[in-house]
């Protein structure tokens, strides 16, 4: 018998979410970020569903290779940039654009053999301090890049926000994003080229950052990173439903303890369900007792520790539950953000963590 654990990918939800991004940023082109295997949803599957996007963003050249092999012809941008001189031939072969964020890359481009010019996205470090040229070096970097024969003339200027999930709903909020907007504007004033600033959170909450290109990632999959809000609060739909079934229902006596390290004690005689899901499938091991699941469409809570293959569930609210009944871990009816919050992370991590033994289906 096959393991009953599956991840259903909702194609219509992906398309709906792209439409919602376009509605919110009607004057911007949309780069659909499909890195990390389409945020765990399947790279080729997601890209085909989002074929209406103006470009795709990836983190690895291998992802670009897969997209081209799947027949997708949209522009592809290598968001982390190239690492070695040999990568330049791959960029040209696959017709991939690249982010340039460090002087070492300028040197490699300067020594590149003649060939088709490569379109570059010049990254400005406006305050996140991860990748990008410091604001005071941007003009020099732009001039050097524009002078290189290996580089196409239409250089795009971009940055990345550190705290755009904090919306400016009061004067005390959104200070870092305001500062980054100002730093970027000053560093790039007068320079030619399109601008790209907004990630998912900025698409949702910072319309002044939409510019020429927006780069949504999590929003396309229906996920919010805004504290206390689910994707549905922004009109987004979950693109993945992770589900399994009960494989046992046991009657456990009051005072007995459940699972590894005996961390949860039954407060009364009670039914306990065993669901075929665990951290071996990608469910967060650190999800504590009280984390919700849906059994037969109604809430029940995890009890005890999540193990590799199984979890135990409090069925006192569903005394008629039986083996074979459906269990939803997140998705339609249960936002992944709630599971992520219980586990001390964000919704992006659980969906990116689904393992190969989970069966993927499309809906």
Image (cartoon, helix red, strand yellow):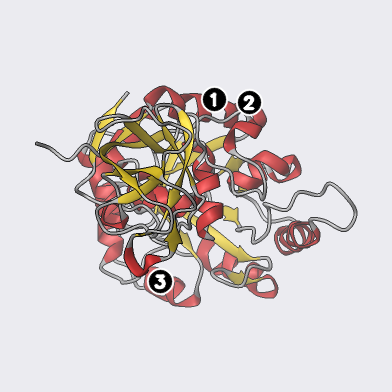
Who's the residue at 28% across and 64% down the image? 87
Q: Residue furthest right?
A: 171
x, y percentage for residue 333?
A: 50, 30
Q: Which mark is residue 64?
A: none
Measured in 3D between alpha carbons, the distance from the residue under mark 2 to the one under mark 3, in whole angstroms, is: 41 Å
Q: Which mark is residue 110?
A: 3
> Which quadrant of the structure image shows residue 149?
bottom left
**Which is more N-terminal, label 3 or label 2?**
2
Disc 3, SS: helix
> Where residue 8 sits in the image (x, y, percent)?
32, 32
| Residue at image coords 65%, 33% | 233
For the N terminus, give its image quadrant.
top left
Residue 331: image quadrant is top left
Write down the residue under mark 2: 23
Q: Is residue 174 left or right of residue 313?
A: right
The spot of residue 358 in percent (x, y) is 23, 44
Specify whether residue 346 is in view.
Answer: no
Label placed on residue 19? 1
Pointers 1 and 2 in contact (C-beta within 8 Å): yes
Report whether 33 appears left or right of 115: right
Quarter of the figure with the C terminus:
top left
Q: Nearer the viewer, residue 227 or 283?
A: 283
Kind of element beneath mark 2? helix
Q: CA distance from mark 3 to mark 1?
A: 40 Å
The first of marks 3 and 1 along the sequence is 1
Q: Is residue 41 left or right of residue 190?
A: left
């Amino acid at each position: 018998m096959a393991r009953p654990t599956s991840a259903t990918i909702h194609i219509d939800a992906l398309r709906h979410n792209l439409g919602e991004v376009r509605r919110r940023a009607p004057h911007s082109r949309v780069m659909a970020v499909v890195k990390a295997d389409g945020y765990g949803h399947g790279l080729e599957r997601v890209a085909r569903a989002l074929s209406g996007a103006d470009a795709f963003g990836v983190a690895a050249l291998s992802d670009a290779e897969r997209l081209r092999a799947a027949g997708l012809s949209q522009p592809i941008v290598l968001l982390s940039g190239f690492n070695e001189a040999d990568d330049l031939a791959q960029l040209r072969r696959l017709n991939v654009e690249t982010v340039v964020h460090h002087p070492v890359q300028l040197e490699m481009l300067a020594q590149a053999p003649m060939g088709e010019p490569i379109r570059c996205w010049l990254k400005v470090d406006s305050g996140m301090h991860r990748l990008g040229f410091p604001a005071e070096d941007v003009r020099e970097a732009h001039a050097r890049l524009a002078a290189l024969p290996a580089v196409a003339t239409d250089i795009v200027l971009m940055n990345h926000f550190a705290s755009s999930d904090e919306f400016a709903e009061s004067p005390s909020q959104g200070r870092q994003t305001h500062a980054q907007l100002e730093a970027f504007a000053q560093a790039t004033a007068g320079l030619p080229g399109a601008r790209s600033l907004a990630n998912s959170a900025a698409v949702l909450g910072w319309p002044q950052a939409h510019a020429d290109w927006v780069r949504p990632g999590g929003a396309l999959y229906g996920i919010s990173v805004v504290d206390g809000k689910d994707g549905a609060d922004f009109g987004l739909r979950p693109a993945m439903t992770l589900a399994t079934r009960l494989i046992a229902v046991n009657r456990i006596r009051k005072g007995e303890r459940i699972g590894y390290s005996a961390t949860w004690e039954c407060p009364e005689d009670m039914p306990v369900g065993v669901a075929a899901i665990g951290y071996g499938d990608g469910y967060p091991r650190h999800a504590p007792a009280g984390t919700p699941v849906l059994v037969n469409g109604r809430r029940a809570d995890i009890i005890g520790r999540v193990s590799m293959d199984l979890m135990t569930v409090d069925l006192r609210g569903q005394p008629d539950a039986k083996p074979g009944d459906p269990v939803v871990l997140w998705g339609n009816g249960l936002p992944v953000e709630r599971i992520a919050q219980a586990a001390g992370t964000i919704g992006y991590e659980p969906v990116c963590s689904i393992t190969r033994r989970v069966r993927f289906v499309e809906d």
